[in-house]
Each structure stands twice: as structure tokens, then as C-alpha cells.
Amino acid sequence: MKKNKLLSLLLACSIGTHAVSQPVLLANTSGYHSGDQGGNGQKSLREVLSAIEKEYKISIVSDNDLLNGRTAGPLKGKPNLEEALDAVLKPIGLKFEKVSEKLYIILSKEFDGGKYIEKIEKKARLGGSNDPEMSLLAARVTHLPMPNHHSSQAQLISGKVVSQEAGEGLPGVSVVVKETTNGTVTDVEGNYKISVEPGVTLVFSFVGYNSEERLVGSSTTINVSLTPDVKALSEVVVVGYGTQERRKVTSAITSVKGQDVQNIPVTSVDAILQGKAAGVQVVQNSGAPGNEVYVRIRGNGSLFGENRPLYVIDGVPMNNIAAGQQPLEAGGQRITTQNDINPADIESIEILKDAAAAAIYGSRAGNGVILITTKRGKQGKSKIDFNAYTGVAQIVRRLPLLNGQQYVDLYQEAVNNYNQFKPANLAPIAIDTNIRYTGNETDWQDQIFQAAPVSNYGLSVSGGTDKTQHYISLGYFDQDGTVKGQEFRRFNGRINLDFSATDKLKIGTSLTASRSDNKRIANDFSAESVMANALIYNPNNPVYNPDGSYYRDPRNHRNPVMMINEYRQKSIQNRYVGNIYGEYEIIKGLKFKSSLGMDHLNEKGDLYLSRNVVNGNARAATNMYEVFLWVNENTLSYTKDFGQRHSFNALLGQSAQEASTRRFGAAGNNTPTDIIESVTGATNRTEASDYRST
């Protein structure tokens, strides 16, 4: 018999945590007998292997006969797992085999795998043994598929998960087979049931508690007691106008730490939340750099209105461009103002998901709130940090499209089918002779896709004294799109200062400035879309004519390469977000805080379609969007602790906010030349709009 048959049988017959009397059965080495202790500094082989199990978190299985009466010397130094097993087993004439990452078996050097398996099967099928382990083994082995198809038999594991502190059942505890997605959760009383194979490890995890792991052996009942994660419960999270320890938070708040989102090659804060916050749907509808990311907290809150959450950075509600105010869209793709935040400056992100958490922001929080807290200086020597990364983005999988001959054949087949089955009152369609096989075999996906470099550089200085702390940073982000013609560049600067004027008075400021340049192309399914045209364009058509001009399809489909080079759209966004605050402690525990913040957003968009695109009739458009928001907030808070178990918190606040908006645009066509790429050169003005808020 082959060795792999032996290994699968060993897995199928995984035994419990105590040794078995029959020498032909397998025993977990954690069943150590104190009477096996050897002399001259030696320890029993069982004890040494048990220590290895605990040290390296594995399971070791062997025949009892190989362990009885054997001793081994203690391990020296810090060897790796297999070095440790070699050091223990080789001197006494034994060897080991690795079954999986967590399971090893001990064998003699003269081991005959075939006879050993036959011996186990014969003993297991005798059926007369009163030993419970023998009966269990017999039940498993006799149900195994015969030669070369041995597999494990799943068994039903049940138990209860309780809190170590209260001793009560914990509902909603995750019970998952380690390194798999197979799992379940506990019911309202903490009970669970799960069907698994012997030898696997179950992981028990619950928010606010330390995770526990249990190896599945012969026992079908596994009860677990979880201990509170003191560190996690003591973690401070931002909640509206203040902070709280997580143990005291009862509303739905998800926290993402800054170190978890740094050095991720994306342009906006929205995108880095993807997959990191439960209950938050993050979808990037377009692969173009700088375009909006779809964010929904617990679904859509409005049928026709705005569904994006409210963003608050260092206490300042951020402006976002509403759906009807977008300066210039590129095929329905909107720009997101969250591009202006440098992820390297983020200390933490809190997502307020339910009404209780977001209520303090009123109706603005109807779609949830995302609180962004930036880094601040700490007392100590100045610390200089420089971080950078660079890479390349590529299209992993392309759509399989028709070649030149297939394109012609399919077109002709479609026309013939129509003419054959058309209604009698309709005229037949003639074959278009312009659609013919030419041998060009142009791969239009090759023509529009590229390996897109992405780079990010950041420099920050932080530190301070017991009176003054500072954090200053500069950042530059540069990304090209995987579709040619797309680019995104961003420059960031930030200054955060905190100053303790007296023992009771503290003042500070936060200010960030950014500028982003976004070169865009249409990428929806319009006639001007590069992507759409590349997917439907005839592969028999060349990119250029012999004279170097763009080839024009007689059926008026747009040449994708021409659309990349002759459709020019650029958005420039300048932004300044900041606030200044003062906090005074009137008496111990009673604090008054006042802050004044502002957000100034200015965005300009320009679009130009050359005369090549629109058959000599060029088109131009320009648009400007500007909004200025100021907010003043005054809060009076009182905190009092009564011993270690009780505390009292009260907050009284007042807030005033105002925003003014200005938007105007112009468009025109019939431009006689491509020298002037603006509305100025248009002889026919098609749009003139001007809007300002009251």
C-alpha cells in the first residue's frame, strides 16, 4: 500500500487526548504518564513531545508501543519545529512524517505502512472490544470507502460559549473552522452545533473578547469560556462631540485605525474602507483614478435624493458635490471630494451607523456619518517620517472578443437571419460591403489598456513640549489609469497645532490644503466612451490611415484611440479645510469648548472635443463650482467617575452652520479651429448658466 493511504487513515482515525491501551491504535502524545520519567536528566519521550506540541501549537500522533519506556534529552536553544523533532527522534531510532501544517506522526525507521493499515482495519472490524476508543475507531474505519479513497467522517460537535466574567451564554459568537469559511454562530443562550471532521481546529471569536481555539478530537462536546479583551474595550473611539471608551458605547460604531489604511494604493478615503467595516457597502464603479466610490451605510436612505454619508474631518462637516451640481461629468462618472484627504494623515476613522450614534448631527446624518480624525503631535523629540510606495496597475483579465473573420461571419449571419425571419411588410437588409475581412486583426483592448504606474510620497514632522505639540505633513500622489488618457495628481499639506496656554486653557488649530488635477475620459456606454467603442469596434479596421490620420469607420463608430487623444477633459480642485478651537476647564470635570471651522471647495472643469471627433464641428464646455461653509460649535461637558464601575457624562451643545454656493457654466460648438481649445473659439454658444445660493 502507498504511504498516502496511511496518512489519510491516520486523519480518519484521529483520537482523543488520552492514550489508548491497544498498541495498534493511535494516541495523542499529550496523554503524558508521570511514571515514564527517565534518569540522568532525561525526560520521557511523551513529556518532550507534549512540550513540543505546546511550544509550536501542533498535534503529534503515534503508536503507544513507540513511546512506552523511551526517554529523550531536553531541547537546547530555539530550533524550528522540524529541527526539534529531528533532535528528539533520530538518537532513539524514530522518524516523523508531516501530514499537514498542524499534524505530525511519529514512526519507526523500519515502519511497514501496508501491514500497519491492515492491522488497524482487522482490529477495528473485530467489533467485540469493550474499549470506547476501539469502538469509535471501528465505527469510523468500517465506514471508510475502500482502497485508495480513505476520507474523514464528519461528526457533529456541540457545546456552549459563556463569558468568563458572568458565566452566562454569549449569543452571536462566531464558531469557524480555522483557515476556512465553514462555521456557525451561537444562539441566544450561547449554544452551537457544527458538523466538522476530526483533527480540525475550531476558532471561537466575539467582539470585545479574546479569541479561543479548540482542537476537535474524539469528544463531541466542546464548551468554551471567553475572556474579555481589556485592551479592545479600553480603546477610545470618537463619538460626535467627544470620545468614549469602547466598553461604554452602546450604539453601532465601527472603528478603522490609521495604520490599517496606510500605503494602500487608492486615491480616496472611501476606497480604503472597502472590506474593513461591517455594514458599509463600498463599491468602485469605475477603475478611473479620482472617480467617485459608491459608499452606502446600511443601504440607501433616499429614493431620489442624496445617499452619500456625511463626512466630518476634525469636527468640520465636509462639503460634497451634490448630484445636480457636478461641474462636468465624464460619462456619468462623478468626482469625489474625499480625494482631498491624505490617508497618511489619518489617525482613525469612526463610522456611525445607527440613529443613536448619528443623532447629534441631525438630518445631515440620515445616510450615516464618517468621522475622520487626523494625527496630532505628542510630547517628545521631533520625529520625522518619510513614507513612499510605487507600483504598477494592470488589467488582470480581458474580455475574449471576436477576431476579424469571426466578426464578419457573425455580422453576415445576423443579416441573413433577419432577412429570413423578418415580417413580410419589412424590407430586407443588404449586406454592408464595408464590413469585410481585411487581415488587420486590430486588438482594440491592446490599444486602450496600459500598465499604469502609481506612486505616493509623504513627509511628516511631529513632536512637541509639555506646552506645545505639532504635526506638519506634505504629500504627493500620482496615478495613471489602466485606460490610456486618465491621470490623477494630488498635492497635500497639513498643519495641526495644540498649545496649553495655562493649566486650564488649551487652544489649537487644524488646517489642510490640497490641489488635485484629474485628467479624464468618457467611460460609460455613450458614443464617446473609449471602453464601449473598444468592445464593439470592428477588428478589421486599422488605427490610422496610410497618411497618419485616424481611421474612420463608415458606420460612424468612434475610433477608440482617437477618443483617447482627441477627447480632452480636465478637472482641477482646490480645497482648504480647517478649524480653530479653545477649551477651558471651569472646574474639575466641567469643560467649555468653542470651535470655528470652515471648508472652502473650488472646482473647475474643462471639456474639449476636437474637430476630428465630431466631423469638423468641435465642441467645448467649461464649468465652475465653488462652495464655502463655516460652522461654529460650543459645548459644555461634565464628566464624573464614581469608583471603578460608575460614571456620569453630560453634554450641552449649540451649533451654527452656513454654506454659500456658486456655480456657472458655458458651452458651445462650431469651432473652426483646434488652436483655441475653449468656449472662446465657439461660434455657436449652446449653454450659459449661473447659479448662486441666497
Image (spheres, rainbow, N blue to C red):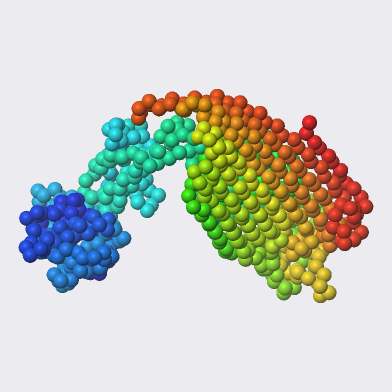
| Residue 671 appears left or right of 420 | right
Q: Say whether residue 395 is visible.
A: no
Q: Residue at x 58, y 45 (%)?
A: 496
Please tell me whether residue 529 is drawn above or below residue 190 in the rendered image: below
Q: Residue at x 49, y 43 (%)?
A: 466
| Residue 328 appears left or right of 583 | right
In front of the other: 42 or 95: 42
Q: Which residue is drawn at 23% across and 50% down?
A: 217
Q: Could you tell me residue 655's position as x and y percent?
A: 63, 28
Quarter of the image where one finds residue 229 = top left
Q: Say whether residue 517 is visible.
A: yes
| Residue 243 appears left or right of 625 | left
The N terminus lies in quadrant: bottom left
Q: Which residue is drawn at 49% across and 52% down?
A: 381
Quarter of the image where one finds residue 159 = top left
| Residue 383 appears left or right of 145 | right
